[in-house]
Image (spheres, rainbow, N blue to C red):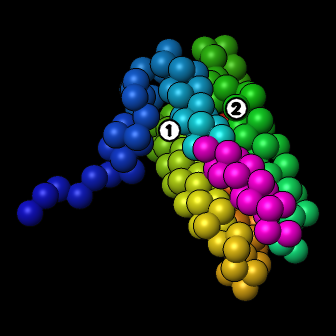
Amino acid sequence: MGKELSIFEHIERLIPGFHGYKNKELLREDDRLVRGKVAEILGQAKRELERALQRCVMVNCQQLMGIENLRKKLMMLQSRILHAEAGYRGYFDRIKFKEEELRKLIQYDYMMIDKAQSILEDAKALNSAVADPSRLGMAVLNLEDKLNELETIVSNRMSFVVGE
């Protein structure tokens, strides 16, 4: 029977070069790697939505504007994640990360990665549902919910990183 992986080990497996915040000097680099990976996954989801838009135009579906709105929200989230302030507090900063706070940051990272992967899966499902109006409507709603959940995670993580 295999050992169950911790959240930290899951992230290490998903992101090449991730150091796990072991050295505080590497904190900024690790934060950039995590955000870059999440943005990459969201970029894949955006491409799925762009393909869905193309297919939607061909079959004249009713969800064209809904899919376009999801694509715009996805792009906004991707940009917000990619260009966010780095998760690092310098030596002279008033607020510093301690071990417990680093564990909390890793939990946020895992939630972002997990939600981004779920968004990618939902974007693929939406793309495959374009020809079926009943499935497509539900796929649009599901993806919208997941994007809202990711937005909340990102906001909470950013607030945590800046010490709010």
Q: Are marks 2 and 1 in contact (CB under 8 Å)?
A: no
Question: Any mark on residue 102, and which?
Answer: 1
Q: Is residue 162 visible?
A: no
Where residue 51 appears, x then y in whole percent?
70, 52
Residue found at the very far left of the displayed protein: 1
Q: Is residue 46 magenta?
A: yes
Residue at x-position 91% and y-position 63%? 65
Q: What stretch is highlighted in magenta?
A: 44-60
Residue at x-position 84% and y-position 60%? 57
Where residue 132 appears, x then y in whole percent?
69, 79
Identify which residue, 147 or 65, lies in the foreground: 65
Provide the secondary structure element on which disc 1 rests: helix
Q: Does the magenta stretch include residue 154?
A: no
Which residue in the protein does label 2 denote?
Answer: 82
Is 117 displayed left or right of 19 in the figure? Answer: right
Is 104 displayed left or right of 53 in the figure? Answer: left
Residue at x-position 67% and y-position 45%? 47
Is 27 displayed left or right of 140 in the figure? Answer: left
Provide the secondary structure element on which disc 2 rests: helix
Residue found at the very far front of the displayed protein: 58
Identify which residue, 157 or 55, lies in the foreground: 55
Identify which residue, 96 or 88, lies in the foreground: 88
Q: In the figure, residue 40 lies in which quadrant?
A: top right
Where residue 33 appears, x then y in whole percent?
53, 28
